[in-house]
Image (spheres, rainbow, N blue to C red):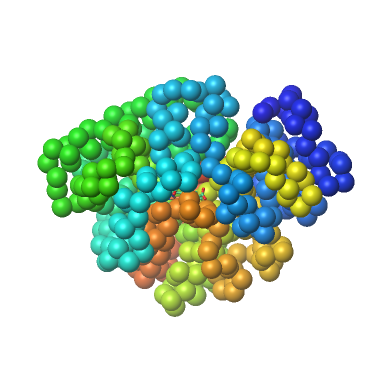
Amino acid sequence: MTMDNLAETGATSLHGSALPVLTVKQLEADPHGVFRQYRRDHAVVLHETGGYFILRFSDLDRLGRDPRVGPSGTSFPESLGISSGAIFDLFEYSMIMADGDVHRRRRAPLSRQFAARAINEMRQSIRRTADDLIDGWYGDGEVDFIGEFAAKLPARIIADLLGLPREDIPEFTRLVYVVTKIFSFGLYLDEIGKIEKAAQQLHDYVETAVDQHHHRPREDFLSAFLAAAAEAGELSPQEILYQIMPLIIGGTDTTRVALATQLALLLQHREQWAAVCDAPSLVPAAVTEAMRFEPTGASTVRVTRENVDVDGTVIPAGQLVTLSMMSAMRDEATYHRPDIFDIRRTDQPRLHPIFGFGAHRCIGEALARVELEESLSAITARIPQLQLDTPPKITGHMGVRRIDAAMRVSWKP
Ligand code: HEM
């Protein structure tokens, strides 16, 4: 849907007035401000690149689990005229966009390995990885935190977990940073050719790794997954491949952005930084608040299966619906003074919407949390005198958000 045919949706609110259309330009300039301005009077707005945006926490919470609002399948690539290739297959064959029983079959062989208990057993080795990375640059007194920590830690953990050689990390991370742009839903349309090429290369890389593990099983996650999938006998070779790709994508980029953002936010709120350095028990709350305040995942996409009424606005069947976590997590009706960064807040919901909803809730949540917590624990314990010299710039308001520039921090060793 474009600006030209938005009017054809005939979308109106309860009072019959046309829904506002938010533009990329205004949202990129001040996403939180724009969401705040519209959220007060509108539960639903339109977006110039297509579809409906849901802005309020209570509606997200409800629609995220409503069977009338299902995964979007291949609707998004098809809306761009893409009907084959690696981008298309990523939507077609991965669990993320699948529904019902297909989703269950694709997710089930991975569930045990990603369960909180299994991931907690990795806590010490994740802490060791964080300490090793810090050892690599501690003596220098300054570092580009994104390049030398935030990018490296999750990539090492996912490589070790899947049994991918560490020397492959620079190449697969390069591909992942390009492929994730497709999950920014519409913000990088001029780069589709480049994204398709990277997706194909990532596909080929995973295919080789799967083949190798197939022929020579090892004591690692990938071999265990292949064995579980073979035993269940429910996944095609194509499906097996496309469950591994999202693990590499999700496991590498989202956590990189979250690691940089949480450190920057704490260093910009010095009293809270000092509190975490003094009391490590505050680490989990600091991690949660950073993800609420400046989330890595701005939104997730669904499609209406039938007409759905959201606070008086009827969204017709077959429409793309964006559940904006970024807006919902600053909703005044849910959070007290939502625009204040406060690691001591007591109004965080038990299930943080940053990791999504219902059956599709992020399978990597426990892993991401442990990585974020152990990293923050290691840094606050070892470098409480840390200073933020160049703050990172986080951009985007749909799907996965981006952080591309350097973030420099320094300290007296
Ligand atoms: C801070 C880090 C992360 C954030 C914010 C995040 C966020 C999300 C969100 C919002 C969803 C979609 C849920 C929905 O549509 O309802 C999701 C799904 C998913 N995530 Fe993550 N994620 C993170 C880390 C990870 C990691 C570390 C992995 C893997 C190692 C991962 C793998 C996945 C997969 C495979 C899905 C699809 C689940 C399904 O459809 O059943 N994510 N994630």
Residue 411 is left or right of residue 162, and the answer is right
Residue ranking furthest to the left: 216
The mark tally for this picture is 0
Q: Position of residue 151 (x, y in %)?
A: 37, 47
Q: Where is residue 137 in the image (x, y as percent from the top left)?
A: 30, 55
Name the residue nearer the viewer: 151 or 253: 253
- Residue at x-position 40% and y-position 65%: 373
Quadrant for residue 268, please give it.
bottom right
Task: Using the rendered image of the protein, determine whether residue 19 is visible from the camera's viewpoint.
Answer: yes
Name the residue nearer the viewer: 134 or 117: 117
Quarter containing the C terminus: bottom left
Q: Where is residue 85 in the image (x, y as percent from the top left)?
A: 41, 24
Name the residue nearer the viewer: 166 or 205: 205
Task: Using the rendered image of the protein, determine whether residue 148 is visible from the camera's viewpoint.
Answer: no
- Residue at x-position 67% and y-position 44%: 53
- Residue at x-position 45% and y-position 70%: 283
Quadrant for residue 72, please give it.
top right
